[in-house]
Amino acid sequence: MPVVVISFLQFLTPEASFPPEINRVVLDDSDEARLQQQLEAISSKYGSIAATIHLHPQLPNPDKEHQMLERVFLIAKHLKTSLNEAAKQGNSCFFTVARLDGQLGTGGVTEFSAVTGGLFGLTKALRWEWQSVFCRAIDLSTDLDPAASIEYLLAELHDPNRLIAEVGYSSQGRTTLVC
């Protein structure tokens, strides 16, 4: 299954280097209908989308945060069928990854946008609506290096406990919430 990195033109960051086997698609996020067409084109070219991992960028202002959050909600809306069909064939996931405090907002750090918390709400709601799709929200502390962040993300992808909806990682280790 090919890996495709999707970026939004409006939120494009400096070009990262990717291995040649990873494809990059830049979406012009002009409106919802165009977004749906672009996602369908990705499916046609690379195959049905079976997994989505949204890596939320740190954005400079609340308006940009709201716009990005809206795009993630729309992506979820338009990938509902694809992800649920993939779940019938094996594994499927919808992950959101944000950089708060690594402790799901409970660590006392306040330098992150509360709007980003909407990712956690979306992911937890989808977990109930799409019960066959593995949905999890992950909070990575900003002081984690990229190698550790990748290690933690891979660990969550392989976590057999699908009952956990959200997880945080910081220098203090893994955090989950208990109700």
Image: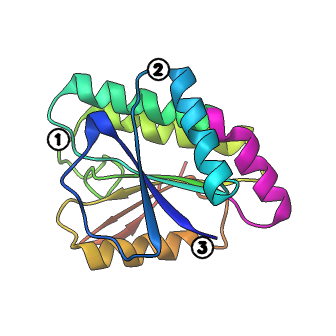
Q: Nearer the viewer, mark 2 or mark 1?
A: 2
**As drawn, is 151 to the left or to the right of 46?**
left
Q: Is residue 125 visible?
A: no
- The main secondary structure of the magenta stretch is helix
Q: What's the residue type where badge 1 is placed? A: Thr
Queried whether the magenta region covers residue 45, the answer comes back as: no
What is the span of residues highlighted in magenta in the rendered image? Answer: 78-92
Residue 51's mark? none
Query: What residue is shown with label 3?
Result: 159
In the rendered view, tell whether residue 129 sits above or below residue 46: above
The coloring applied to the image is rainbow
In the rendered view, tell whether residue 107 sits above or below residue 150: above
Q: What's the residue type where badge 3 is placed? A: Asp
Element type at mark 3: loop
**As drawn, is 144 to the left or to the right of 136?**
left
- Mark toward the start of the polypeptide (3 vs 2): 2
Residue 110's mark? 1
